[in-house]
Amino acid sequence: MTEQLQGVDAAAFRSALSRFPSGVTIVTTRSAGGTLHVFTASSFAALSLDPPLVLVCLDQGADCFAAFIAAEQFVVNIVTPAHAKLAKKFATKGADKFAHGTFESDEGGYPALPDAAAVIRCELEQAVPGGDHVILIGRVHDAQIGSGEPVTWYKGDFLRLGESAT
């Protein structure tokens, strides 16, 4: 049976949202004890240019939820087509997500993708509840641009820019 959300069919809502192409990010942090944490997000946007702020949304049921709420900093890596498998892996629960050594530590010890389309380093400014997610607002303190093209998420799959969806 399809779940109803305040009069909205959950499956229909999810399907409607899948028709909106969005960029894909891999967001990383490290706990005070040094443990690395990561999640994949397509809900990412610029919030302000002055001061420089971005937002990214994290599911409250994610294994890494507590770590990101307590984090002082986080890194937003804008995904390229080469990161598609990695992004799918980080969108699931369980498993050692850092087992493949794809990340490099920046000067603060935070994991960053060296070949991302862009890497945006943020201080956690605020965490705002939003339904079953929390909106992490980050004050940008560094942004680096890579050479790769970003990938989009559309209808449940990755799509290269300029590619036709089936």
Image (cartoon, helix red, strand yellow):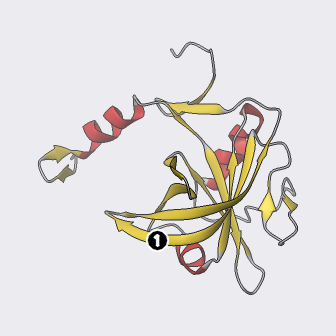
**Residue 32, picture quadrant:** bottom right
Residue at 63% x, 21% y: name it: 161
Residue 43 appears anywhere in the view = yes
Could you tell me which residue is drawn at 62 percent across and 15 percent down?
162
In percent of width and height, residue 56 lies at: 52, 56
Is 48 in front, or is 144? 48
Q: Amino acid at mark 1?
A: Ala
Residue 104 at x, y percent in the picture: 88, 59
Q: Residue 73's spot in the image, x, y percent?
A: 67, 71
- For mark 1, what is the residue? 127
Identify the residue shown where x is 69% and y is 38%: 84
| Label 1 crowd (10 A; few <14 / some 14-19 / many >=20) | some
Q: Nearer the viewer, residue 69 or 64?
A: 69
Q: Is residue 121 left or right of residue 67?
A: right
Residue 63 placement (x, y as % from top left):
56, 70
Q: Is residue 54 above or below residue 82?
A: below
Q: Left or right of 149: which side holds 104? A: right
On screen, 130 above or below 149?
below
User: Label 1's element?
Assistant: strand
